[in-house]
Image (cartoon, rainbow, N blue to C red):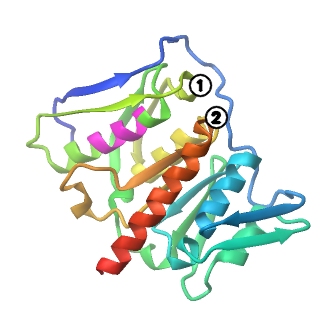
Amino acid sequence: MKLPALVLLFACAASADTAKKEDHPSGCTIHLADPLGPVHLRAASPIEALIGLARDRHLCFAFENPGRDLLEPAVDLTLDKASPRVILDRFLNAARPYDITEEQGVISLRPKKNRHGATLLDVVLPAFNAPPSETLEEASVSLNVMLIMLRKPKMTGLGGGIGIWPSDEAIGPFKEKDKTVRDLLDFAVSRSNGASWMSGPCNPKDLRNGTLCWSIAQYSHEDAAIETTKTFVAAQRRRRKLH
């Protein structure tokens, strides 16, 4: 299906620096099996502990529809030596197994029970392009807009604003074709200076109000990365109580 003509009215404050970036310094430099040395994790939930670790140790995660094992309880864990894989194994519930993979430096956790069930993250976008000044948050919003327009072709435009984001998060330019939303989120994060993304179930009904079914935690925003994660955890807890 081709995307319809679209006029975007987003009040995006893009970076003034439009020079082409040949190399994008990636914040995703630590891999699944890499030794981390001594690790002390303390947070209100495992996923908050992991984002804190990721921010400090140059890790990038993708948490897709995490279960209660990552949303609670509080964590106070010290390990003399560990890798991201060892730490994840300490938190994950064997009763709700995950596929743990790594793509483009992004370590992804995806529930195995969803392996054969399509979500909005499985939707393939015909094309996704970004100018040199495109920031990670702008790319995230653009992905959502394209997803809405693809699923609702009768719509002719959307309006809104996403605020001002630091120029060091510019991830363009790039041109991608026939990639899933999941793959594009991984790709965008891998071109950043450090970030992770996390999603809820991302069911088609999540498009009704036009909001994103995923969140981006950017490490350059310092404490905001943890606040983003806390907000996400709270939202997923509410969702589970309502069901």
Q: Nearer the viewer, residue 83 or 219?
A: 219
Which residue is drawn at the image coordinates 59% and 64% (left, top)?
Answer: 47
Q: Position of residue 198 (x, y in %)?
A: 49, 57
What kind of element bears circle 1?
helix
Give the residue at mark 2: 193
Q: Is residue 68 magenta?
A: no
What kind of element bears circle 2?
loop
The reply to whether dot 1 and dot 2 touch (C-beta < 8 Å) is yes
7 sits left or right of 108 in the view = left
37 sits left or right of 177 in the view = right
* Label number found at residue 168: 1
177 sits left or right of 108 in the view = left
Q: Residue furthest bottom?
A: 95
Query: Is residue 181 at all visible to an observer of this figure?
Result: yes
Query: Which kind of residue does numbered mark 2 sit on?
Result: Asn
* Label number found at residue 54: none
Vertical placement of 107 versus 139: above or below? below
The span from disc 1 to disc 2 (Cα, nearest Å) is 7 Å
